[in-house]
Amino acid sequence: MNANGKWDQALEPGWAGVTVTLTDDEGRSVTGVTQADGTVKLSPGTALSGGKYRIEVKNPDAKVYFPGAASARTDLTDPRVLSSNVEFVDLSAGKNVEVTTSFWSPEDYCQKNATLVTACQNASIPAPAPGTKRTLTSFPFNARGTYSQLTDLADNAQTGTVWGIGYNKVTKQIFSAAYAKRGTSYGPGGPGAIYRTDPATKATTLFTTVPNAGTTAHHFDVNMDEAFIPAVGRESLGDLDVTSDGKDLYVVNLHDRRLYRYDATHATAAAPKASYAIQDPGCASNSDWHPYGVGIQDGKVYVGGVCSGESTHNKADMRAIVQVLDPVTGQFTATVMDQPLVYPRGGFNTPGYITCDGFGWYPWTENKPLTSDGEACTNRTIQHPEPELSDINFETNGDMVVGFSDRLADIGGANLPATPNNPEWNVFQGGDINRACRGGNHMFVLDGNGGCVNHANAATNGGVQPLNVREFYPGDYAWAAPPHQETAEGGMTVDKAETSIPFVAEDPITDPVTGHGVAWIDRASGTRTPEGNYLNADFGKARGMGDLEVLCDQAPLQLGNRVWQDTNENGIQDPGEAPVAGATVNLYDANGNKIGTAVTNSRGEYYFDSTVTKNVSAADLVYGRTYTIKMDNPDDYAAGGVLQGWVPTRPNQGDDDQIDSSGEPDGNPFPAVVVNPAGAGQNDHGADFGFKKPSVDLSIIKVGPAKVDPAGEVVYNLIVTNNGPNDSSGWTVTDPLPAGMLNPHTSDAGCGIGAGTLTCTGGPLKVGESHTITVRGLAPATGPAKLDNCATVKGNEQDPNMQNNNSCVTTDIPGIPLTDPGIAAAFAVLTGLGTAYYRRRRHTTGAAH
């Protein structure tokens, strides 16, 4: 998740159900599927042979997932170093090899110690909160203490009270949504406002106004704003999220119970792109349905809400529901969680301190409850949490992390005096952070209903654990006051580069100061990590914070993978084929500027990235641009270079881009791959280059006379033919001429004769073409004799058939008869032999007698 090319076991769990294939040079395979821990063991057994194999790990969903960042590895000895999804192993002689690879959803990426953003909610009772009080504020993930390392981004005059917070990774803008809460005011945009804040300039503007968000006004000077209570949870806006590509903003309208979708790429939005009715899932009454939370994962939008039980006041009618919207069709396609809320929970665990201490969820009310679980609430202080499903996040393994807010804390507040409808009261809020895991029917089941591992015990929950409580995250108790066993205020974020989950909480620090801020729990064990960050004193132990968002950068890119020798010229990376080490690979931008250089390692691997190999800047390698990867170093192909005599193999063979060669001609002798990453983190490990030493079957046939009279002319024709399968770039013919042949000569421009040997060079020669060399000379003047002659051809490329590269011819020179003196003299002059005696040739005319 952090693009470091290593397996961080605490952050990156195994993935079950992934198909893995082991293939030999003959194309035979054995296949397995990963277990729950993400491992699978494959053995060639008797089904495969050769000792060297290709491992291929199948992408479960290529529309969502991409190869994780890998490291160029010199060996496979360390399983903590990540390989690409295609790997090559040697299992000969009983060897064992462990390979680790990964896929990732780019939206899960985050840098270490990223910035967190939340919002403080400011009380306007008994007096209006000043406009200068902070609302949006940010701090590093690792900040701990009191108001630690804060950067204030917006104030009360700019945003008023907000809850939902989202972040656009692309434009680097923060969005916050208005929220209805008793005793605190809306901002200048009213109940439907969404604000846009630039964290760099700290400028906040109104992004849009969601229609039909409610009309109930605050009256802080009338009965402590009591008339506003029915608007809480029913008007204004709930959760807000922005898609990882920065294109869309989704927000829940609590009043008309619709999900609104806005274009998030601009500074303002005059109107929504669309809105979708969030259908009642079958609550006891339609008025009981209250959607609120939003989560976005793997291209889907999750919307959560509760059946409040308010119409029946029956706990059995309370349910938590999560539905899924398909953004492409605009339809809600499934309900993935539908859970009862009657399970026991932590509460205020100090018997006798208060009479109603909230060990569960309770139906929504409009006033201070007078009884709870059959007990009279005689104290002014009460814990009686009313559920709102306010936030949805996802763990790396797909589990859902659910935030619940306590509505009663927003209608009751802290230390409110008596009014005509309510006695004096003070609320201890009791929100929660829960895990929901997949059940047997693939529906999510809450930890409280036994859906996940139960970590609850006295040691993990402040020293006291109520009976039968089941929690994955029991560490969400108040660090300063362990009796507060449920302190989460509904907002949290899962930063998958970190080992802990930050969440907005009551009493987040050890110093016993009442208030609110951010606390952390361990992602794996659910235990509390010491200290939080204290941020707000308003609203006592009720609820004083908005949502929490992590400002993750866009996922970085990685391009590249492997260069190899395609010895069988099929364009596929076969297991036994050797890598090309030491070859130079260059990366160019769309303007032809070289922005990165890599050299293949001993296993033929190369990568371009800013986080692992670090050979290109993050600013130069971003999605939405066109890049060209070239193997264009002339020295690699020159004499002594690692690719001398090699040429690119056939590109794009087969139907798997991960195991073929992608190098194509680029207007020069060198291959190139054009890459167009469409989105952040869409790593491409398919930029592979295969090279072949072209095989050319050259043959030679030497044609010459079977017999020549003494001193007669000898004519040899040497015929060189290219029988394929590739064109010949050049060839050499060598012919040691017979010692008895006189005055050898040729008119072929590529030939020469030295020290009695004919040497000819030529080329290129296309498949099926031939070239003929003619050599002339004179036979010896005396006989009998033989002229034995063999010629050989050798090509620039490898020759798969050396049986036809040599051809011989024998020419007989018979005994020489007496010759006419004129012929003898002429021969003597021609050969420079001076005077000689010859037999006279016998002449006859007419018929023989």
Image: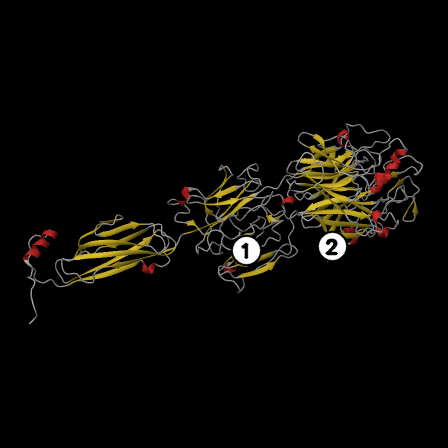
| Residue 459 visible at all | no
Q: CA distance from mark 1 to mark 2?
A: 34 Å
Q: Quadrant of residue 391?
A: top right
Nearer to me, 379 or 92: 379
Q: Is residue 836 above or below residue 268?
A: below
Name the image quarter holding the N terminus.
top right
Nearer to me, 576 or 132: 132
Residue 842 placement, left or right of 94 = left
Write down the residue under mark 2.
Answer: 443
Q: Considering the numbered disc 1 on the image, is that residue within a helix, a strand or a loop?
A: strand
| Amino acid residing under circle 1 | Ile
- Residue 419 image point, x, y percent: 92, 36
Q: Quadrant of residue 707?
A: bottom left
Closer to the camera: disc 1 or disc 2?
2
- Residue 545 image point, x, y percent: 78, 37
Residue 831 placement, left or right of 634 = left
Q: What's the mark number on residue 729?
A: none
Nearer to me, 793 or 775: 775
Crowdedness of circle 2 by 10 Å Cα count: few (<14), some, many (20+)?
A: some
